[in-house]
Image (cartoon, grey):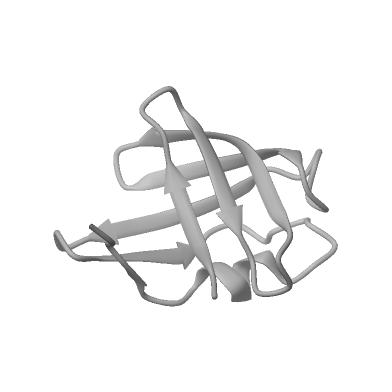
Amino acid sequence: MYQIEFAEDGTFKTLVLDGSTITGTYVVTGDRIVFNEVYGVCVGFPGNFGWSFDGQVLIFKSGPADQCPIARAADLQRPWEKQP
């Protein structure tokens, strides 16, 4: 199970399938979001994505080539359903 939690203070926490946790900060500018990990395998490699949200489902769209050494873009580009 994948889960992303966004806090109003600009931090995020992602729980991934293998049970590990990725944490960091995010900045939203219009329809773009930039992720900066402070704990995870992509530390030092900001992730720049487009995004859309219809009130229930969040979708990320890959932006400029992601320099992270893992497939972060592939992991994020799935429908993320809002949880209660």
Residue 83 is left or right of residue 6, and the answer is left
- Front residue of 30/74: it is 74
- Rendered-image quadrant of the N terminus: bottom right
Count the numbered circles shown: 0
- Rendered-image quadrant of the C terminus: bottom left
Q: Quadrant of residue 66?
A: bottom right
- The spot of residue 7 in percent (x, y) is 41, 33
- The spot of residue 52 in percent (x, y) is 27, 59
Vertical side of 72 occupied by 44: above or below = above
Vertical side of 57 occupied by 11: above or below = above
- Front residue of 70/65: it is 70
Vertical side of 59 occupied by 38: above or below = above
Which residue shows up at 80% across the image and 42% down it?
Answer: 43
**Among all residues in the image, which is located at the extreme top?**
9
Residue 22 is left or right of residue 50, and the answer is right
Q: Quadrant of residue 72?
A: bottom right
- The spot of residue 3 in percent (x, y) is 49, 62
**Among all residues in the image, which is located at the extreme left?**
55
